[in-house]
Image: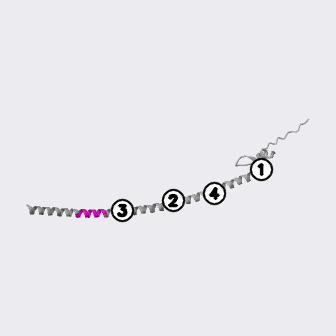
Amino acid sequence: MATAGSCDISFDSCATCSSKHNRTRAALCQCKHCSESFCFDCMKDHNDSLQESIALVSNQYNEVQAMLKIKKQLINDETNKSKIQISEWLQQFIDKLNTEKAKIETQIENEELEAKVTQSIEFEIRIFQRYILEIHW
């Protein structure tokens, strides 16, 4: 009796069909992203899911970029504002120092003039004392 030869067809089964749909389908393609094997329908669903994920990440990236741009502008604005405030404060401080310097210089000049007058008076008093001593002796 002749036996029929067995035909052993080996194929990868679709990962999604076997895990989610409890069915077996031949995998026609493999995802380069995750290396899973899929039938045509599941590959399309997987691809759509990946596209949605990419779009979500892209939107989040764009939002973060926009926030960073706003924060950077805010930092620049506050930095410039602070620099202006410091410059104004420093100029006011310098003006006050110059005013005080002028007052001190004026006081020194007045004291110097007063010292010269006092010295002149003391000199005249000594001359007068000598004169008086000469008259009495």
Three-letter amino acid code at the position of disc 2: Thr
In the picture of the structure, the residue carrying the numbered disc 2 is 79
**SS for dot 2:** helix
Magenta part, dominant SS: helix
Q: How far apart are marks 4 and 2 (CA)?
A: 24 Å
Residue located at (12% from left, 63% from top):
132
Instruction: Tell me the crowding category of disc 1: few under 14, some 14 to 19, or many 20 or more residues within 10 angstroms, Cα based.
Output: some
In the picture of the structure, the residue carrying the numbered disc 3 is 100
Residue located at (55% from left, 59% from top):
74
**SS for dot 1:** helix
Of badges 4 and 2, the one in the foreground is: 2
Mark number, residue 63: 4
Q: From which residue to which does the magenta span run?
A: 107-117
Q: Distance between the residues labelled 4 and 3?
A: 55 Å
Of badges 4 and 3, the one in the foreground is: 3
In the picture of the structure, the residue carrying the numbered disc 1 is 42
Residue 44 to residue 87: above or below: above
Image coordinates of residue 1 in percent, x first then y, are: 91, 35
Image coordinates of residue 65 in percent, x first then y, are: 61, 57
Q: How far apart are marks 3 and 2 (CA)?
A: 31 Å
Kindly give the residue lying farthest to the left in the view shown. 137
Looking at the picture, tell me which residue is in the foreground, 12 or 22. 22
Residue located at (78% from left, 46% from top):
20
Instruction: Tell me the crowding category of disc 3: few under 14, some 14 to 19, or many 20 or more residues within 10 angstroms, Cα based.
Output: few
**SS for dot 4:** helix
**SS for dot 3:** helix
Q: Distance between the residues labelled 4 and 1?
A: 31 Å
Sequence-earlier tag: 3 or 2: 2
Looking at the picture, tell me which residue is in the foreground, 21 or 79. 79
Sequence-earlier tag: 1 or 2: 1
